[in-house]
Amino acid sequence: MINVNRHILDNGLRIVHNEDVTTQMVALNVLYDVGARDEHPEHTGFAHLFEHLMFGGSINIPDYDTPVQNAGGENNAWTNNDITNYYITLPYNNAEIGFWLESDRMLSLDFNEKSLEVQKNVVTEEFKQRNLNQPYGDVSHILRDMAYKTHPYRWPTIGREISHIANATLDEVKDFFYRFYAPNNAILAVSGNISFEETKRLAEKWFGDIPSRKIKARNLPKEELQTEERRMTVYRDVPVDTIYMAFHICGRKEKEYHTFDIISDILCNGRSSRFIQRLVLEKKIFSSIDAYISGSIDSGLFHITGKPYEGITLEEAEEALWNELEKLKHENIVISELEKVKNRYESEQIFSNINYLLVATNMAFFELIGKAEDINDEVRKYRSVSPEQISEVSRKTFIKQNCNILYYKKSSGNKE
């Protein structure tokens, strides 16, 4: 059970706290309620660019990393389509350095052309390496564009086009910062060997004077119901043919989310899972296979991806996948199979709640989508999923008119 304390500053910054005296460390996790879904379609990749810019110097602190290292700490960040997340861990006696550093970044960055050019080059190079020059690197772009026609999930976090980052101006970057990077659009989660009173004192001291900003209400277009199967075949210089399937599912806040998560584990988590046992080990249709959910706050995707053994066509591989999905719809799940998945999740949850940094990260996210205390109810939600719910959800989801299918084939030299 994670004990959550909470406090809200006058400027709207939400603070959630959990004390853990078994560690000598403190974690600060700052979650900003901005991701790739908040970008303009012609100016994508900005949320991810800011993940990098936030380490390029703030208004009063030209170098972020040196004070962290001198204090014996570590830091990093990540961005997805929904959020931008920053964290720092420090020995408890140096915890105030974390409050100092994070508050100055929230107040304002040191906006200058040199820093912007450096980070733009870093991000565009990352785009090239991961998405343009790497085998299968453009899959996310293709699949998202197939599955989403109106919702901004139709581009990945890295951005829709490399030119959107390469051409970003300092004024555009400033505008993005002041629209989203604000105390009233952020959650500060603190966990580790620090009391709630000390957390409140340091938060008031360092974050209290940062002015709140006018945050425009999010009003994203809702994705229309997909009513027919979408298919695409591309040819690339890759080692083996691969099949990708993506089905529309609910969002992270909805009740069926946990059912979809369990289904993905039943299909493909561990050696005893259905896809591994039947399609890899027994029938030898796939050499590798995976099934997972996107976990998006808004309506997400259920992904299946597989590389067939040599001599197996993508059509044969696809038929085998549909056969397994049909079994999910019409055959009751054996209780022992379901319990094994639930037990695995519970053990993972217990382990993650022991780690002070994971606790801070998870508290921030649960506070965003509901309230931080919901972290304590996750195991029950997974435990409550029944075989009947799995069949019901499968019947309405794993149908051809809800499916996006990408055949990713080895280039034959004369096809593009």
Image (cartoon, rainbow, N blue to C red):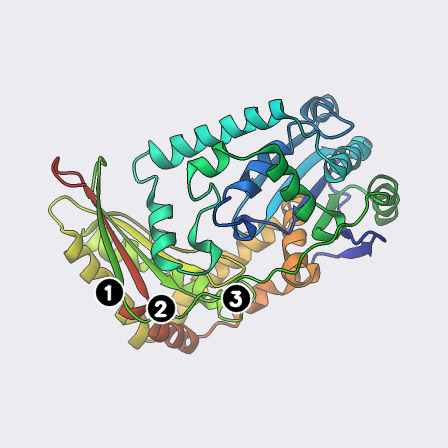
Q: Is residue 95 visible?
A: yes
Amino acid at the residue labelled 3 = Tyr
Q: Secondary structure at mark 3?
A: helix
Q: Residues within 10 Å of mark 2 (few under 14, many from 20)?
A: some
* Above or below for 313 versus 225: above
Q: Which mark is residue 288?
A: none
Amino acid at dot 2? Gln
Q: Label 1 belongs to which residue?
A: 322
Along the viewing direction, whichever of 138 and 8 lies nearer the viewer: 138
Residue ID for mark 2: 226
Q: Which label lies toward us, 3 or 1?
A: 1
Closer to the camera in the image, 101 or 230? 230
In the image, taking residue 400 as reference, residue 95 lies left or right, namely right
What residue is rendered at 78% in x and 28% in y? 60
Q: Are marks 2 and 3 in contact (CB under 8 Å)?
A: no
Image coords of residue 207 (percent x, y):
82, 42
Amino acid at dot 1: Trp
* Above or below 4: residue 189: above
Q: Position of residue 47 (x, y in %)?
A: 57, 43
Taking 174 as reference, is 198 left or right?
right
Q: What residue is pinned by disc 3?
A: 382
